[in-house]
Amino acid sequence: MSHSPSAALPVGHYAYDDVDRTFLKQRVAQFKDQVERRLSGALTEEEFKPLRLMNGLYLQLHAYMLRVAIPYGVLDAKQMRVLAHIARTYDRDYGHFTTRQNIQFNWIRLEDTPEILNVLADTDMHAIQTSGNCIRNVTADQFAGAAADEVLDPRVYAEILRQWSTLHPEFTFLPRKFKIAISGSQQDRVAARFHDIGLIAREGENGRPVFEVFVGGGLGRTPIIGVRLRDDLPEEDLIAYLEAVLRVYNAHGRRDNIYKARIKILVQALGTEEFLNQVNAEFAAMDRARYRLPEATVEAIRARFGAPDFAPVGNAAEKLAAQRKADRAFDAWVHTNTHPHKQPGYCSVTVSCKPAGGIPGDVTSAQMDLLADLAERYSFGELRITHLQNVVLGHLRQDALYDVWQALEKNGLGEANVGFITDIVACPGLDYCALANARSIPIAQKLSSRFANADLQREIGPLRLNISGCINACGHHHAGHIGILGVDKRGEEAFQITLGGSAGDGDASIGQILGSAMSEDETVDAIARIIDTYLSRRTAGERFIETCRRLGTAPFKDAAYATA
Amino acid sequence: MPLLENGQIIQDTWQIAVEGDSLPTGNVLVPLARLSEGLGRNTDARLGVVLTSADEVETLRDALPRLDVVSLTFPIFRDGRPFTQARALREHLHFKGEIRAGGHVLPDQYEFLLRCGVTAIDLPEGSDPAVWQRAHEAFTVAYQPSILNEQAEGFALRRRLT
């Protein structure tokens, strides 16, 4: 491990100082006061609700749920151990990683929450703005700062936006929630066009970054692909421009109907051109000096990030090659679960939180502790949660992979299925959520078991399967190559299938509904027949999504509704 | 109603225009629809405007130099439009007079209101100003610029709250 001066700073995320820590303690004290005012009746339940939501506290079907923020998905080993401690002490020994790179605990008692927030604050964590009609956790590329294809590290900007949006005086009571994602790679791994604001950073002419700005994308009841407002927003105008977009939204977004309140509806109602005109008018009128983001500020934030101190790796690549040759299962895992690193001899690993027949994104306290240990030992203490509900170890020496894989294998985290059909994204569904129409988890488990065979998954190849328990689409079913939507069919849980959605890589598309809803078991069988159709109709090397686009939905619809 | 200004409860000397009645002689707050009537009064008494959260502050641009008060209204505390109205009055229209916030406002929103340019709160009868003062003192740092030109706190975008 490194002993350079920067080793004192956590690798991959912003290091708090005393000012930041004081702020977190003040936030906990404020929440404690709010809970007391609720109990005394000074706050009505209606008034208390948005205040607790902005501290991540939901009331679900059976209990309170606490959603803890993991800014841009990055945390360190110490913080992961605190999450394990919370799961063990205040919950039922597990947590659930979410599609916004956060973690949620599903069995929390209201009276424990001020204490939990205090425990979190002790390791520079919080639950601020993980819910409510405010700017939510800013998400970033899970391979940020590591990926070979990266142009620049987006996490510094994600941190700037996190700070700027924290208790923002003007934008804390927006018409609806507001989600921002940022990537620093031309490979869009953050689904930028499915966010209220999506940012793609690249190098500008003067050596400072410029941003491509997408606005008005989203899933939910009305899936819409975001429109590009700017191609080359300069770094110094990043805050000013986002302020302008949010002012137009805060002033004119609909507040009469919760289902029409997202910015995408405003953009659609005004039309892109008129919306852009209003943003530009605000941008031109505002006091730009006040909102300017100076280079010195960016660098001051950057200086609070630790960076990995890569050691010479010797013959790591050869050692890995030999180990892959000797162990076929390991080879398969390396093939699916690693990602190229910019540093020779290193790679990033995606740890699958999708074991065969398991619950997507659920991790036990013991597994969290193991991940913390591995991060500390092999990956500069850094961990990342992905928006596909897995965990990434960002910087592993190639000759450490075999040890890491064996440790993961022993603890139920060694599944070699990243990017395959069993790497399912699912919302909590009716097992927990008060909004759901159907349970997402049991059908996810059945599909995971159905396709568990490693050779079969490899044969099928890259495929995104997303499950939402209701039309609010927290499982992003519209963006799945195969999407499953839980509906209520005359009082019974039933499922619709969508086909052909895609979240990123410059080809975002919205899945098409195949037909009427089916029961859970019928849906699992229908998906098996859709896969058979793909396998028999694909051309050499053609991925599932490509075959869908070439053939259209008709043959898959026939297969799905064929009764053998 | 009691008015909270700079941490003090003060007596509100302003009257609110009553629908259907002619405007009173003293300092009066009128709705946007009666602005020209208010401006046309032949008096030394002062004039203010009460806005709904849906009103565009831009419509006040010409009248603003003759207004002493703009009163913003929260129909419910969740309707965040008055924050943008206050900030636009200060930043775009350079209004130097009093900005009030009334309607359904929570102490938990007090600091946000101040940082958007509001200077006085119409409190419901019987409100405890200590709760508002506590809310004002809850935080000593903010993470973004506001229309109050607060001092930098350390580095980056942080501002010291006083």
Image: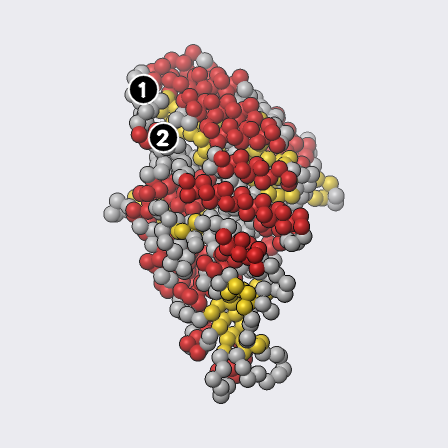
CB atoms of marks 2 and 1 within 8 Å: no
Relative depth, front residue between A302 and A351? A302
Report the residue that reaches farthest toward the bottom. Answer: B42
Which corner quadrant of the image does residue A506 belong to?
A: top left
> Same subunit under labels 2 and 1?
yes
In the rendered structure, the answer to whether residue A318 lies left or right of residue A45 reads: left
Residue B130's place in the image compared with A68, above or below, is below
- 10 Å neighbourhood of mark 2: few (<14), some, or many (≥20)? few
Which residue does the image show at 39% across and 45% down from the upper left? A160
Question: In the image, is residue B151 above or below residue A480?
Answer: below
x 49%, y 86%: residue: B43
Residue type of the residue flagged with mark 1:
Val
Residue A8 circle label? 2
Q: Chain of mark 2?
A: A
Mark 1, other Cα within 10 Å: few <14 / some 14–19 / many ≥20: few
Distance Cα–Cα, label 2 vs label 1: 23 Å
Q: Residue at x 55, y 75 (%)?
A: B13
Where in the figure is residue A490, as x and y percent of width and height?
74, 45
Of all residues shown, which one is farthest toward the right?
A491
Specify the farthest residue to the top.
A326
Residue linked to disc 1: A313
Q: Amino acid at mark 2?
A: Ala
